[in-house]
């Protein structure tokens, strides 16, 4: 079977993880100028379970779906969310699956989760900078204040994702492996 082929089964796995990402995004609370939630952990988990592109699609679709249907964002914001969440999961998966490890190396999975989560923080801060400076036209002092107010919450989300994703992956991958589903998810 072609490894890059999107079968009905693979599309179903992507859809299920996208739905989980979307639903988990509902459970959030404001903290330090951001919204703290475990959706980023689910995005990383998607990358660890499905691999690069499929995991990225699950993360991007689930997050963009939330923004489009419930977040009140315009199409540009939804597209930015899709790309940034896709890249977070893709970076995580690329590292976790590198060298043929297939996300079976716990230490590599932790490193992948850290780098994936930090990738999202950098992209979120870049989006904040571009919007504040070039879309809204705020002076640099205001831009730095806004970015400074959003950074702590973003880092808290990243830290939570870095901790939760590898733990959930360890538990779920073992159960999925026993059920002979993990390899099917990645074919």
Image: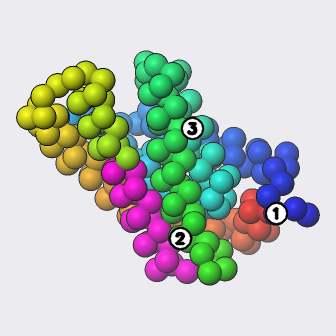
Mark earlier in primary sequence (1, 2): 1
Residue 136 x/y as whole percent: 25, 21
Query: Magenta segment, which residues?
Result: 104-122
Q: Main secondary structure of the magenta part?
A: helix
Which residue appears at 67% of the width and 80% of the height? 100
- Which marked residue is nearer to the observer: mark 3 or mark 2? 2
Q: Is residue 112 left or right of residue 163?
A: right
The residue lying toward the viewer, choosing from 114 and 83, is 83
Q: Which residue is mark 3?
A: 62
Q: Is residue 2 visible?
A: yes
Q: Is residue 11 left or right of residue 92?
A: right
Residue 95's disc is 2
Residue 109 covered by magenta stretch = yes
Where is residue 187, by image quadrant?
bottom right
Residue 41 x/y as whole percent: 45, 53
Q: Residues within 10 Å of mark 1 (few under 14, many from 20)?
A: few
Which residue appears at 75% of the width and 59% of the height? 185
Q: Which residue is mark 1?
A: 3
For this orientation, the residue located farthest to the left is 141
For mark 3, give the secondary structure: helix
Q: Is residue 117 left or right of residue 13?
A: left
Q: Is residue 172 visible?
A: no
Q: Is residue 134 left or right of residue 14?
A: left
């Amino acid at each position: 079977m072609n490894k890059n082929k999107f079968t009905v089964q693979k599309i179903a796995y992507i859809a299920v993880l996208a739905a989980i990402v979307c639903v988990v995004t509902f459970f959030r609370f404001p903290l330090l100028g951001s919204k703290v939630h475990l959706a980023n952990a689910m995005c990383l988990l998607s990358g660890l379970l499905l691999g690069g592109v499929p995991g990225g699609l699950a993360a991007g679709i689930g997050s963009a779906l939330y923004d489009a249907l419930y977040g009140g964002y315009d199409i540009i914001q939804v597209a930015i969310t899709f790309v940034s969440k896709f890249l977070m999961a893709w970076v995580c998966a690329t590292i976790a699956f590198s060298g043929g490890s297939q996300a079976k190396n716990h230490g590599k999975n932790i490193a992948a989760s850290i780098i994936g989560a930090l990738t999202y923080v950098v992209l979120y801060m870049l989006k904040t900078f571009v919007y504040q400076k070039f879309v809204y036209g705020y002076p640099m002092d205001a831009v730095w204040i806004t970015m400074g107010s959003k950074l702590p919450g973003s880092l808290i989300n990243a830290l939570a994702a870095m901790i939760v994703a590898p733990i959930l992956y360890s538990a779920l991958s073992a159960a999925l492996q026993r059920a002979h589903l993990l390899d099917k998810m990645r074919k």
